[in-house]
Image (spheres, rainbow, N blue to C red):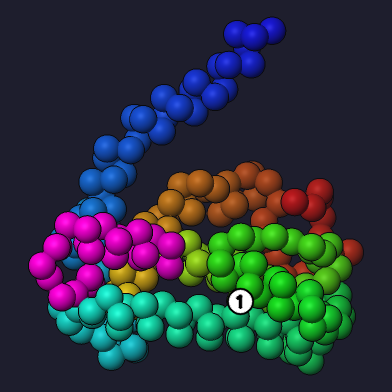
Amino acid sequence: MLVPNLVQPLVLLAAVIALTPPLGAYIARVMSGERTFLQPVLGPVERLVYRGLRLRPDREQSWRAYARSLLAFSLASVVLLYVLQRVQGLLPLNPDGVGAVGPDLALNTAVSFVTNTDWQNYLGEQTMSQLTQMAGLATQNFLSAGVGLAVAVALIRGLSRRRADTVGNFWVDLTRGVVFVLLPLSVLRRPGRLHPSGGPVVSAAAVRDRPGRLR
């Protein structure tokens, strides 16, 4: 019994070891602003975000400015997600007619998802509307992970640039992490979601009207 139980973790460990060098090199190129094979496809998306936020990718921040941007973004994310939960009963994409989330649970959920903890102390479709799940929780699944990636890269820069005054630009790092790393990985992780043969597709229909088994 011992050998079969070890197969899965050993295969996982081997996959991690095999994928770390190429994936790490790819992430390093992305966060350094170097051209990658996804640039022709995702480059326009990146530039659109920069234009929308009026960002200059070549303008870096000091660690204090980087930290202020990080905290401001995280605080705004908590507030927006909290408000979305509190007013979801008044918003569209709520076919099940769920009401407002209680203030304590809404705050707990907002802080949890913004900090990438994703602790769900509730029954999914019975508590959150479709809009809250898509525009709030699912969005934070990407943004919170992007923030974590940005912080890790900024820390590496701070350790390697011992005499430099800057550690990058938080908004640029967040954009590159989400667009070039997390979104492509999400497609590779669940390609079946793009086609019915891969199982139930995420739907905005009411829970009672969805065919098949819920996931």
Residue at 56% of width from left, 67% of height from top? 115
Q: Can you say whether 196 is above or below 53 in the image?
A: above
State which region is magenta.
Answer: 147-168
Q: Position of residue 129 (x, y in %)?
A: 77, 75
- In the picture of the structure, the residue carrying the numbered disc 1 is 135
Q: Position of residue 33 (x, y in %)?
A: 19, 65
70 to the left or right of 110: left
Where, by quadrant of the figure, is residue 101 drawn?
A: bottom right
Q: Position of residue 75 (x, y in %)?
A: 53, 83
Predominant secondary structure, magenta span: helix
Residue at 73% of width from left, 81% of height from top? 85
**Quadrant containing the N terminus in the rendered view:** top right
**Residue at disc 1, secondary structure:** helix
The answer, for residue 45, to whether it is visible in the render is: no
Residue type at numbered disc 1: Ala
Residue at 68% of width from left, 83% of height from top? 82
